[in-house]
């Protein structure tokens, strides 16, 4: 059962206490050396492996509740854990441990004519609040990334993954304490009340330095509207894939199916297929029939519906929809100009891909499309911090301030300046 509180005052005091403990834990964490942090990460991975069955049992409770509530299959897939996914969580922690420690890294250094030596050095942000839905692996990813970057974190997972996330969180705390770090460095809000989110968004009296929302459009909109601290926005993944006339046909067919159907419920799943009107008609038809054959529903423009009668006519809203399901919108466009115009009109600035052999098309796509991640001849499903060599990610930031794209350990740091002198005074 989810833990309950009796009143708004109870929740306010609970959250204030969490904020105080996070602030206290952030101080020793910020100065912890890489060996100690890596020891904690290794201990966490060992604890997750040792408690594998406990985590799976907790996850089964969440999955059964989700199925009973009629949750869509794609969302159940995001929620579900199995041995392979737990192996992935463990591998992600080990990969984060193997990364260079960002704290104290000298980003730039220069000397002034007056003899002052100046360095720009990475430093932790402090306390990070992470609000997320459905995916219990985010508990481990966020905890590990914040630890590596020297930040304390307050986690607020969705009620649908409550039992799974708490089982994983217990392993994270065990790893911290075994390494001699404060268990409060990674805290999980123990109640499901929405009022707790409201308290977190206030910043808990200055305890919270930044909020990272990871979830649906309504969650992110609420966070952006109500937060009184900076937000790394992870907006919906309305991802596009454009197939140019110059594309290799076999490559395009393989990439399009993978981009949509590998996992339909993740933010890197392609939601709109744009086809160059000059593409060979047989190739264009194959792209669409391959998707249909893979079990994908197509909502297309008039030309798409004429080419494959199984497609349903697309409404205007379809071009703005993140389906997170086995559905894709598709239309023909007038070359790279048409693709860029469509993406500029409808994209959430998350991830877009171009399939082309013409280097001029690729360069225009890279230069003129303004999204956080752009891919050439590769599936949009690579939009993931782990695939970028970051070990894991807290989310994909679609804004333009501070962090953009996968938010990993470097993006969870700020910087300060160290200035060394030999007695200089300013005239």
Image (cartoon, grey):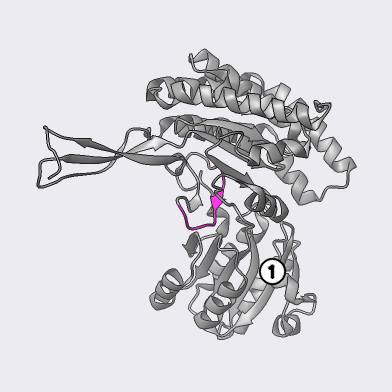
User: In terms of depth relative to the viewer, which is nearer, 70 or 354?
Assistant: 70
Residue located beneath label 1 in the image:
320
Q: Which residues are magenta?
A: 394-401
Q: Is residue 285 left or right of residue 99?
A: right
Residue 15 quadrant: top right
Q: Which quadrant does the N terminus fall into?
A: top right
Is residue 400 located in the magenta-colored stretch of the structure? yes
- Residue 202 position, x and y percent, is 63, 40
Q: Nearer the viewer, residue 181 or 225?
A: 225
Q: Residue furthest front?
A: 427
Indicate left or right for 257 with 43 as reference.
right
Answer whether residue 85 is visible to the viewer in this image: no
Give the image location of residue 150, x and y in percent: 45, 30
Instruction: Examine the image and state in which quarter residue 14 appears.
Output: top right
What's the residue at 79%, 80% (across, down)? 309
Q: Position of residue 200 (x, y in %)?
A: 65, 37
């Amino acid at each position: 059962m989810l833990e309950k509180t009796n009143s708004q005052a109870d929740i306010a005091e609970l959250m204030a206490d969490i904020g105080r403990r996070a602030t206290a834990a952030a101080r020793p964490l910020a100065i912890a050396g890489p060996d100690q942090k890596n020891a904690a990460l290794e201990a966490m991975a060992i604890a997750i492996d040792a408690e594998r069955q406990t985590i799976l049992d907790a996850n089964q409770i969440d999955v059964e509740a989700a199925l009973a509530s009629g949750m869509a299959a794609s969302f159940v897939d995001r929620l579900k854990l199995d041995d392979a996914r737990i192996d992935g969580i463990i591998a992600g922690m080990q990969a984060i441990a193997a990364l260079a420690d960002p704290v104290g890294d000298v980003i730039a250094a220069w000397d002034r004519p007056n003899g002052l030596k100046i360095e720009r050095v990475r430093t932790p942000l402090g306390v990070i609040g992470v609000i997320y839905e459905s995916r219990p692996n985010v508990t481990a990813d966020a905890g590990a990334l914040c630890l590596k970057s020297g930040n304390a974190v307050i986690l607020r997972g969705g009620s649908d993954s409550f039992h799974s996330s708490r089982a994983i969180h217990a392993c994270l705390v065990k790893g911290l304490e075994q390494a001699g770090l404060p268990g409060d460095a990674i805290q999980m809000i123990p109640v499901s009340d929405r009022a707790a989110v409201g308290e977190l968004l206030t910043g808990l009296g200055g305890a919270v330095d930044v909020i990272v929302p990871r979830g649906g459009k309504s969650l992110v909109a609420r966070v952006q509207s109500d937060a009184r601290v900076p937000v790394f926005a992870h907006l919906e993944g309305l991802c596009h894939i454009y197939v140019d006339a110059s594309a290799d046909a076999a490559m395009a067919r393989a990439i399009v199916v993978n981009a949509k159907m590998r996992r339909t419920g993740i933010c890197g799943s392609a939601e709109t297929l744009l086809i160059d009107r000059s593409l060979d008609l047989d190739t264009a038809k194959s792209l669409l029939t391959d998707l249909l054959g893979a079990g994908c529903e197509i909502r297309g423009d008039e030309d798409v519906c004429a080419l494959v009668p199984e497609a349903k006519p697309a409404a205007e809203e379809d071009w703005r929809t993140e389906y997170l399901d086995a559905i894709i919108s598709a239309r023909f466009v007038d070359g790279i100009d048409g693709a860029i115009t469509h993406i500029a009109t409808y994209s959430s600035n998350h991830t877009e891909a171009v399939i082309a052999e013409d280097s001029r098309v690729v360069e225009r796509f890279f230069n003129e499309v303004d999204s956080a991640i752009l891919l050439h001849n590769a599936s949009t499903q690579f939009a993931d911090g782990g695939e970028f060599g970051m070990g894991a990610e807290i989310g994909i930031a679609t804004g333009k301030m501070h962090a953009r794209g996968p938010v990993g350990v470097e993006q969870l740091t700020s910087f300060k300046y160290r200035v060394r002198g030999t007695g200089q005074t300013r005239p």
